[in-house]
Structures are given as C-alpha cells and as structure tokens.
Amino acid sequence: MEFVSTAWDLEESVVKTLVGSQSKTEIVKLDPSWKMPEPRKEHYNGMALNCEEAPLDVDIKDGGKVVVLNTKNQPLVGEVGLGADLVRLNGKAMCSPGFSCDSALQVTYIVRGSGRVQIADPDGMDWFSIITTPNPVFTHLAGRTSVWKALSPEVLQAAFGVSRDVEQKFSSKRKAEEIFFPPPN
C-alpha cells in the first residue's frame, strides 16, 4: 500500500479504500446497468488516427494508396519513437520494391487479401507496418523516387554490365510514376 500511496501521492486511507474495493485480479465485467461515457473526438484528438479516413500520402488510380503515420499527422508517434503506414495495393497492381533511407526497421502485417512478393492477386492486398522511426524516409527502385536516378549512365552501365542502349531504355522508364503501377489495360 505504501508503494501505491507514494506513486499516486494519496493518503493511506484512500489507498486502502481503492485497493480494498478490488475483489478480483482478473478481467472485470461491468454490470449491464453501468453507464460508460460515450467517446468524444476531443478525448482522442492527437491519440488516434483513422487511417481509412486520413489524407492519403500516395493515391494512384487503379494502383494503390498509402497513409503514413508520422509526427505531422500524429504527434504522439514522436513521443513513442515509432511510425507506421497502411498500404492498400489494388488487385493485379504492383508496388515497386523499396527500402528505408534512414536505417529504420519495418515489421509488416498483411491485414487483408493475399498476394505474392512480385504481384498481388485479383483482390489486392492491404498491409500495415510498424516502423522504428517516427518520420520514416523511404525510396524505391522504380518510379519518381527511384534511387537509380541518382546514378550516372556510366555507373548504371558498369553496375549492370550492359550497353549504353540497354541503360538508356532502362533509365527512360517509370520516371514520373509513384510507387504503385496499375495493371496494364
């Protein structure tokens, strides 16, 4: 009781009443007549973000959508030191392979659908990732943020062991797209 009294700065008589009123140590079932307060937006403002209603960070027609949870839209992630993202990949679309630029680790949960590493099935696939930084920075191997764009043609030719003609064909594709590529028509 002394620990509880010190931790909450309560008089010992209040602690005895508080601790003594706990009849069990298991999950408490409330009487159906007990009225709980209804949640109000101001109660969870800054504490919760509905990823399905949040502004999209990426929205590619017939490709997919991304919501990134970071300190801009959820200040609490800065306190926790984690970020997250929800990715919705449309059926038959492709997501460019990518990686974290800031050495963050990412744990990904498939929350809907199924797919393969290289392409989604007709129903698409959704995944949610916990990221070990509150403001993740990602880049991809294809699309507008492709890391290949930072390399000179000569470096690409040498790295891939290809001719200038093949390198030019490679470099000229997928330069403006985002990270999702809708299926061909």
Image (tube, helix red, strand yellow):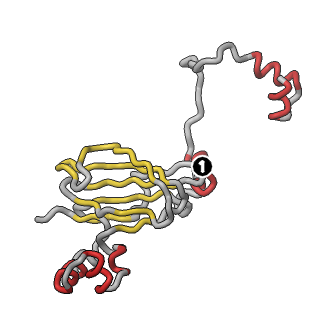
User: Residue 77: x, y in percent?
Assistant: 57, 54
With 7 as the anchor, is 37 left or right in this view?
left
Tell me the quarter of the image containing the C terminus. Answer: bottom left
Residue located 30% across and 72% down the image:
143
Residue located 47% across and 50% down the image:
130
Foreground residue among 14 and 64: 64
Foreground residue among 163 and 4: 163
Judging by the rendered image, the residue that carries numbered circle 1 is 42
Picture quarter containing residue 98?
bottom left
User: Residue 116: x, y in percent?
Assistant: 23, 49
Residue located 32% across and 54% down the image:
88
Mark 1, Cα crowd under 10 Å, few <14 / some 14-19 / many 20+, is: few
With 148 as the anchor, is 181 left or right in this view?
left
User: Residue 148: x, y in percent?
Assistant: 33, 76
User: Residue 9: x, y in percent?
Assistant: 85, 34
* 138 to 176, vertically: above or below: above
Residue reaching furthest left? 185
